[in-house]
Amino acid sequence: MSSNFLPAGARDLLPTDLIRQEKIRHTFLEIFKSWGYQPVLPPTLESLEAIDKGRPQFLNECFKVIDRDGKLLALRPDLTLPIARLAATRLKTVERPLRLCYLAKVFRQEIRLADEKREIYQAGIELIGSTSIDQSSENQNNENSQNLVDKANLECLSILLETLAKSGLTDYQIVLSHTDLWKYAGEIFHKVEEQLGTDLSEELNTLIEEGDFVKYQQAVTKAEKKCIESLSKEKGSSELKSCFESKSPESPLQYLKRACYNLTGKPREILDYLDSDSNLYKELFAIIALEEIFGPDKFIIDFTIRPDPHYYTGLYLEVVIPASGKPVGRGGRYNNLTACFGNPESAIGFTLHVDSILKYAVHDTTKDPENKEEKKVMIPLQEDLIKSLRESMELRKKHPIVILK
Amino acid sequence: MNSLHLKKKYRIALPKGALIEGSKIALAKAGIEFEMPDKKLILQTTDPNVEILLVRQHDVPIYVENGAADLGIVGSDMLQEKLPDVLILADLAFGQCDLVVAAPKDSEIKTVADIADYSRIATKFPHLTRQFFRGIGSPVEIIELYGSIEIAPITGLSEAIVDLVATGKTLRENGLIQLEKISSHSARLIANRVSWQINHEWTVEILNKLQENLF
């Protein structure tokens, strides 16, 4: 008889799994609460319309369910989205900032990896409405608004670093990126881009995002040829001409060609490329200062990760551990999300994949009280069942586990 | 970096077969040299921090995508076929070959336009083959094989094939002629995304040495 009853990507959690999960859940929740975050739990079913509005990329990945009236529902593919909906509707009149946290499952089906897990246990926080997103006041009072952004960033990242420190992971780093990169990515970068036209910038962006540095370099070479041709026709300034024709490593085009390799690295090295007066520099610099509290080498900057510009509106982060080839958590700023539900405000948060963390965390099972044999008391059942039960209840006041034999 | 991290050896996944000699020469430029005793799949190198994984070409992107190897060398054909989520760092410019459509010399088929609708095409590259024939609006049936594609038309399994060609010798020996080139390919250096972030300095150093003669 076939025994293929378990669907692809599904998993039974056994007692030992649940004990570990419960323990880490407790640890995380206590940290979140200590920073003033309160737990919420949105429904498992969400209307597909809400997902389409907030984050259409999830439409392909989410499990669809048909309601009685034929309306399409989805098993929630994410918790940030329903929490943003909640913040913009029922919690609209609650005092800001809202500090909310969650520990719950989301449901997804990966298109490419059929057997990847489909129920993902997530833990995370959302800080909503901590900064003004009114454009006019931002321009008037830039300094102050950047300060508020920094405050929210540092709160969010401090909680993340404290959570990771207590998660049992021995080695982890936070990779930072930002949606503003291509606006600020250094003087030379900018100059070259201007000369090459804006089209290329978008193309290079996409190739970097796809991780194809070979095609990226081919695109630069192609643009370079085009530039040299048009320059020789127009007899452009000799300075510019030499800048494109030069093959020295310092020339802007050689620089641009190798830029894909230099967009990743230690924060101080990457920050060197940025204009120190830019908001991007200041924002990242403020975050890196957290290493003073949480220890060195906690951050990597990687501008090859391009945060989805339709969703993220600033800082983007991923949590990586050397043992896993994939991020075990992510987060960032998404100031446009609550607007989808009728109340625009700033928002920042992170989410951790609890199961991935448990997989790589160091865990001493002998310390679990449930595994300590001496803590278990077995009592034989006597003729008088009521008397036995009463005795066992008395014993439970002193012993953690009392089992009826 | 903490101590646990430093103890880890960097791993490079290399494909057994056509690209192995080129890979050896390329890595030697980066000071990584190794012997290949029979049947040994994990090889130590002259660089005490680096070990080599010898795997099938198909599996190189899988090892790298999942972080079991930090770097890998693989043909661009395989990357375009499997679309793994890895970083493609550099064109190593060896292992050059073309992906082509070929048919028996003595058949009616002289160009791809002669391939009748719903003809069978044998290939190791079903995704790229589908893409090509859809692109020219020709409906074909794709038969996925794992090797010896050239005998498919001789045995009547398929009307034509899509395969890699380096010199054209294998095609000729099996009575096949090239109808059209689909794309050109060569070896690529690929990296795991997280490894690229965490081990960036090391990776860029290797990359620079490999590219010294390319740029």
Image (tube, rainbow, N blue to C red):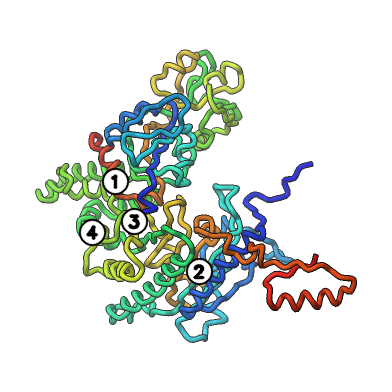
Disc 1 and disc 4: Cα gap in Å?
Answer: 17 Å
Say which residue label 3 marks: B1
Which of A289/A257 is in front? A289
Residue at numbered disc 4: A273
Question: Pointers 1 and 4 in contact (CB under 8 A)?
Answer: no
Q: Name the residue under label 2.
A: A124
Looking at numbered disc 4 in the image, what kind of residue is underneath it? Answer: Tyr
Badge 1 element: helix
Which is closer to the viewer, label 3 or label 2? 3
Q: Do discs 1 and 2 share a chain?
A: no
Residue that carries the numbered disc 1 in the rendered image: B204
Residue toward you, A393 or A149: A393
Residue A301: x %, y % from top left: 33, 59
Three-letter code for the amino acid on which mark 3 is drawn:
Met
Residues packed near mark 2 inside 10 Å, few (<14), some (14 to 19) or many (20 plus) = many
Disc 3/disc 2 C-alpha distance (Å): 26 Å
**Residue under disc 4 on the same chain as residue under disc 2:** yes
At x 52%, y 17%, the residue is: B104
Same-chain check, marks 3 and 2: no
Q: Mark 1 lies on which chain?
A: B
Q: Name the side, left or right, on which A171 lies relative to A110.
A: left
SS state under label 3: loop
Residue under mark 2: which chain is it in? Answer: A
Q: Distance between the residues labelled 4 and 3?
A: 23 Å
Q: Do the residues labelled 4 and 3 touch (CB within 8 Å)?
A: no
Give the foreground label among 4 and 2: 2
Could you tell me residue A156's position as x and y percent?
42, 72
| Picture quarter with the N terminus of chain B | bottom left
